[in-house]
Image: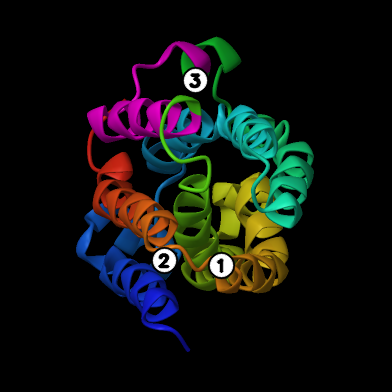
Amino acid sequence: MSSFLVAIDTTAAALDAALTENPILASLLSGSIAPDIYVKRVLAPIFHYTSESSAWLRRSSERLSAQGRYPGIAEHLAQKSEEERGHEAWALQDALALGARADAIRMASPPSAVKAYVVYNEATCSVGSPLAILGTSYVLEYVASRSGAKAVERLTARGGSSGIQRALRFLRAHAHDDLSHIEELRRALTSISEPRDQEAILVSAQVTAKLFPSFFSEPG
């Protein structure tokens, strides 16, 4: 395995291992989170940080194609853009299943870490490296396929009368699908050999890993 892939894996694994240091995420992963906290401090931030994902993937694909580089990755990004379309609606539907109002979720001010994440990815997808989004995607899908799967299992087992079991569409879908997505991303990353491209992807992964726990550390 190349040092580049090792660095990406190390970044994602370190984030995944550190999630329980965040009290909100620790309660999510143990299955003990209260429904109102799950809505306000987990689902609302998820809604906001995923809302632009499809557009970022599409823009990155278009820019990569325009540059005439990595046609296979450009196609992969275009396909991912279609796959990710509307996933924020799953988080919203989960919140509604627990009694939240749609306008309250949409109008909630996202945590500052989510705002920073959106600004960063808007910049990289518009004027930075069109490959940088691969670093963001890898980290998020790594976490979803591991800790996300654990959260679904424990919330299902311990949800009891809280109703959380009927509000797991977003987590369940990503925990299941992202295992195969990780392998697709690894194949794409293996094909990237230019140091400047690798650096852009790794920096994106590191920024995402740094910000992610704070998505769930502040009230929206």
Total residue callouts: 3
Dividing the image into 4 quarters, which one contains the C terminus? top left
**Sequence-wise, which precedes: disc 3 or disc 1?**
3
Residue 29 — which label?
2
Name the residue type under label 1. Answer: Leu
Task: Tell which of 168 and 121 is nearer to you.
Answer: 121
Residue that badge 1 annotates: 189
The part of the image, by quadrant, that contains residue 9 is bottom left
Direction from residue 169 to residue 162 in the image, left or right: left
- Badge 2 amino acid: Leu
- What's the coloring here? rainbow
From the top left corner, tell me how far across and down residue 206 is, in percent: 29, 57
- For marks 1 and 2, the one nearer the N-term is 2
Side of 29 where 216 appears, left or right: left
**Residue projecting furthest to the bottom:** 1
Q: Which residues, given as a range, are shown in magenta?
A: 106-125
Q: Nearer the viewer, residue 15 or 30?
A: 15
In the displayed structure image, the side of residue 16 where residue 125 appears, left or right: right
Residues at marks 3 and 2 touching, judged by CB atoms closer than 8 Å = no
Residue 52 figure quarter:
top right
Question: In front of the other: label 3 or label 1?
Answer: 1
Residue at 58%, 50% in the rendered image? 164
SS for callout 2: helix
Give the residue at the far front of this rendering. Answer: 68
Q: Determine whether the residue tagged by mark 3 lies in a helix, strand or loop.
A: helix
Label placed on residue 105: 3
Measure the alpha-carbon separation of dots 3 and 2: 22 Å
Badge 3, how many Cα within 10 Å: few under 14, some, many 20+? Answer: many
